[in-house]
Image (cartoon, helix red, strand yellow):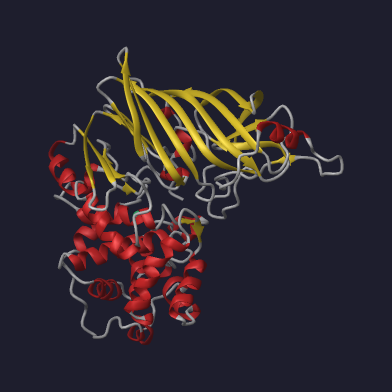
Amino acid sequence: MHRRLIVPGALAASLLLAVPASAAAPTPGAPGIGDPYYPAYGNGGYDVSHYDLRLTYRPATDELEGTATLLARTTQDLSRFDLDFLLDVSEVRVNGAKASFTASGEHELQITPRTPLAEGTDVTVVVRYGGVPSSKSAYGFTSWHRTPDGGVAANEPEAAWWWFPSNDHPLDKATYDVSVSVPEGTQAISNGTLQSRTTQRGWTRFAWRSNRPQATYLATLAVGRFDVTTGTTDSGIPVVNAYSEDLGDHYGAARASVERTGEVADWLAEYFGPYPFGALGGYVPNTTTGYALETQTRPFYSPRQFANGSNVSVVVHELAHQWYGDSVSVAGWKDIWINEGFARYAQWLWSEHEGEGTAQELADHVYASHPADDAFWTVGPGDPGPENQFHTAVYDRGALALQALRNEIGDEAFFTVLKGWPRRYAYGNATVGDFRAYAEEVSGKPLSAFFDTWLYEPSKPAAPAARAASLARTAKPAPRPESWKKIAATNTVHAHDAHHGR
Ligand SMILES: [Zn+2]
């Protein structure tokens, strides 16, 4: 999204029609935004600033229907453009006029407006749709989790296709109004702040608002029977948490973990700077999934995360993402380390805070527990490849790289970087290269060779490099810190249980 002045309607209309005769003929927007990991994800030719979703959902039959209104701005002269979407579309309007549309590829909705759209103009797209999300798949998988009492959309890198049409890539962030009507006695949970809740004739409509830029994969919807708790952090952020009433034996442990949300967010703010959003919380639906996800302001947690008792470490991980991943998002999916390396490192800092092992001890353990011939070291967190985007190495080698950086540039510069980065790129996108440049700027040290060793080389950093980074200082295997098991339990954090297996 771009922050900009609103162009008055008459002027916008005149711009729209004022395609100079000399201009090149309008061309179709690309069916992908240009991400080499996922060539078909997102689209070219426009940039969305706001999604308004007005939906109705029937838990008994898993039917979702409604209207999406997208505010966008064109970035080229467009003869047609794509949205990413899987449900059945009944009508599309572009700037008020009916447009023709057709499904194409695995998840493309190709839209041809009545007249071409000129570059740099504001466009309103209205899509009326319906369908049964659980009946739809792309590449053989689904991100819609049917539950006994409803359904949940939460996955990475894709979840939107099953519930709203979008430009599905983190590069195109937008604000959201999500309004969902569900049978009375059922809740609809989404991101941000609950603006209103009204019940008539047996239906309750929940209106949620996300007023800060949000990536499409960080938008979430959960419908079911939830117990909702509310509170306010010491720093004044309102907290809304939701727990399925049907979590059974996991209920207590889930609640004992997620109710720590406000405390954890305030603690993280000491390292990362002020919490970037005006709403906070978490939710635990009764899914059979195993992972958790940093859905903006309100992370998704699978009940299984709490199978062995409370796990505040996973809450630390998902809340760390609110700075590292949600406010500052990847520019491309190859940049996943700027999300996962830091969320994992936050778990190490929490371990230290809890007296269950220091970040240094955890780093030493990672280094020592993977021998040089372990495939773990063949994955470079700085550009892991799409098939290894959520490999354990992105997390553990990624956090190890941060401890090595801390030892290389010293605590003062390191913690200045940790706190300064979320402010430098707030609500935007960044690359691993941007991070290296920022760390160099703050520390005054050239770090190119250092980053190659720790983030890119497909091999275990040799003992001299490790010693130089104050790691593995003895030949003795590093003992396993007490926090190791709980941190490892979050390794399914983004494991795609029912995923494409690419
Ligand atoms: Zn994560």
Q: Residue furthest right?
A: 22
Nearest the eye: 291 or 295:
295
Quarter of the rendered image showing ligand 1: bottom left
The total of numbered circles placed on residues is 0
| Near-viewer residue (230 or 30) | 230
* In the image, farthest residue toward the top: 201
Quick check: 167 left or right of 151? Answer: right
Q: Position of residue 288 (x, y in %)?
A: 27, 39
Residue shown at 68% from the left, 40% from the top: 121
In the image, residue 63 lies at what x, y percent?
40, 22
Residue 140 appears in the rendering: no
When the figure is inspected, residue 409 is found, relative to residue 121, above or below; the finding is below
Name the residue nearer the viewer: 25 or 425.
425
Residue 477 location in percent, x, y? 21, 79
* Placement of 303 over or under 364, stated as above or below: above
Point out residue 300 in the picture as x, y percentages from the top left corner.
31, 43
The residue drawn where x is 39% and y is 79% is 461
| Front residue of 489 and 125 | 125
Q: Could you tell whether 196 is left or right of 52 in the image?
A: left
Quarter of the image for residue 199 reads top left
- Asked whether, in this view, residue 268 is left or right of residue 212, the answer is left
Query: What residue is shown at x 35% (from left), y 51% (from top)?
Result: 494
Q: Can the viewer see residue 500?
A: yes
Depicted 327 relative to depicted 460: above or below: above
